[in-house]
Image: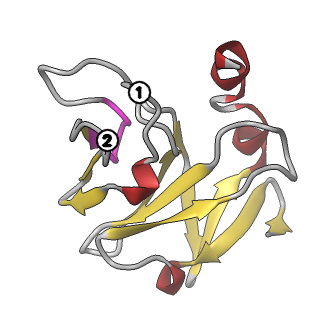
Amino acid sequence: MSRAGSWVAVCRVADIPRLGARRVDRSAFEPGPEVAVFRADDDTVFALVDRCPHKGGPLSQGIVFGRSVACPLHNWTISLEDGLARAPDVGCAARFRVKLDGDLVLLDADELRTVGVAAAAAEA
């Protein structure tokens, strides 16, 4: 990871398979759940905490379709745009803002320190 202001380069778009994900370790910022960075078929990039709101399944291992991911454990559908589970399921995977700089995928350093950390600590 390299820093660019308050944004941190975590990978290149090409490192994420189209309709796939890459897991990003954020231990350099704060212990907490890892981040899943997703690439849609139109090359739009999204980032969510890598935990399904249902049972904590690794969303980075799910199947990406359109702008959603199916949790690999129980097939819950989670929106990549806002992290919300699709009805009838209820819950939300915390999301991160994503910025692209050429082919670099950047995440906000402040969010890497805070998003999803308190919830993970409460579960431990």
N-terminal-most mark, 2 or 1: 1
Q: Amino acid at mark 2?
A: Leu
Relative image position of residue 124 (x, y in whole percent)? 71, 20
Q: Which label belongs to residue 55?
A: 1
Disc 1 on helix, strand or loop? loop
Which residue is denoted by mark 2 in the rendering? 73
Relative image position of residue 108 (x, y in whole percent)? 70, 50
- Residue name at image x 81 percent, y 38 percent: 31
Q: Amino acid at mark 1?
A: Lys
Coloring basis for residues: secondary structure
Q: Is residue 117 left or right of residue 19?
A: right
Q: Is residue 16 left or right of residue 108?
A: left
Residue 91: which quarter of the image? top left
Relative image position of residue 54 (x, y in whole percent)? 36, 25
- Residue name at image x 31 percent, y 48 percent: 72
Mark 2 crowd level (few <14, some 14–19, many ≥20, 10 Å Cα): some
Image position of 39 with respect to 89: above or below: below
Q: Which residues are magenta?
A: 78-84
